[in-house]
Structures are given as structure tokens and as C-alpha cells.
Amino acid sequence: MKGSFRFTKKERIALPQDFRRVMKSGRRLTSKHYILFLQKNEREFHRLGIVVKKEIGPATHRNRMKRYLREFFRLNKQQIKGSFDMIILVKKGSLPERYGEAEEELRRVLL
């Protein structure tokens, strides 16, 4: 149980071709603030990629949003069935004020 709540390097999507592959051929789920792209992977764990464009706001807002999304993934990855590559794209013009709002919205879409 000690390491199960970590967000390790192997659980990150970092390569541009992986982002393109998931966004092009993955299943698309939308909510008020986010667009989620999900694609099954052959690994035995989930991987997460986050896209927050500069039009969202200043760097502090973008970084806060990324922290919220990573924290949600870290705490809830065991509840997601299967093994997926996930890309979360933050929509323009809408930012949740608190982590609780982001968590509630992602729970409705993903879990």
C-alpha cells in the first residue's frame, strides 16, 4: 500500500506521438471544464497526460490546474477499471476555483 498512491514517471505520458495517438484514436468524454481522451493500453497501469493551453490564463492558474488533475489521478487511479492512456485537456474560459470542484466533475465523467 505504501507506493500505490504515488504518481511515478512511468505513469506519465510525455512523448508528443503518444499525445497525438490518444487524442486522435481514443474515446472522447466531455464535461463543463474538461475534455478527456481515453484509449486502452497494453500496460498493466494507467498513464496520464495533461494539456493546459496558455489561453487558460497566467502560469499560476495553469500550474494549479495541473496540480489538481495530477492529485485527482493519484488518489483515484485504483478505482478506474482496466488500463488506459488518459489525456485531460482543460477547456478555455473556465477554471474551477477549488480542488473539490475539479474532483467532483472528474468523478462524474471518469468513475
Image (spheres, rainbow, N blue to C red):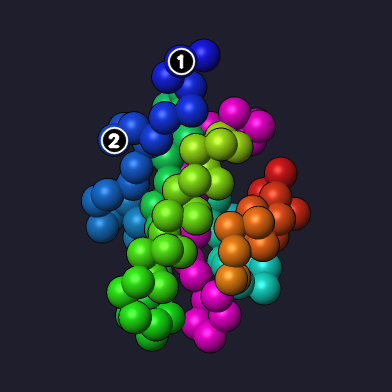
Asked whether 79 falls inside the magenta stretch, the response is yes
Q: Name which residue lies at 55% across and 46% down.
A: 72
Please give the label number shown on residue 2.
1
71 above or below 76?
Answer: below
Image disc number at residue 39:
none
Quadrant of residue 11 in the image? top left
Residue 26: image location, x then y, percent = 52, 54
Residue 32 vs 44, above or below: the answer is below
Badge 1 density bin: few <14, some 14–19, many ≥20, Cα 10 Å: few
Residue 7 is situated, as x and y percent measured from the top left of the image, at 39, 35
Checking the image for residue 9, the label placed there is 2
- Does dot 1 land on a helix, a strand or a loop? loop
Horizontal and vertical percent for residue 33? 60, 72
Q: In this view, does 55 lie above or below 46?
A: below
Kind of residue at badge 2: Lys
Horizontal side of residue 108 vs 47, given as left or right = right
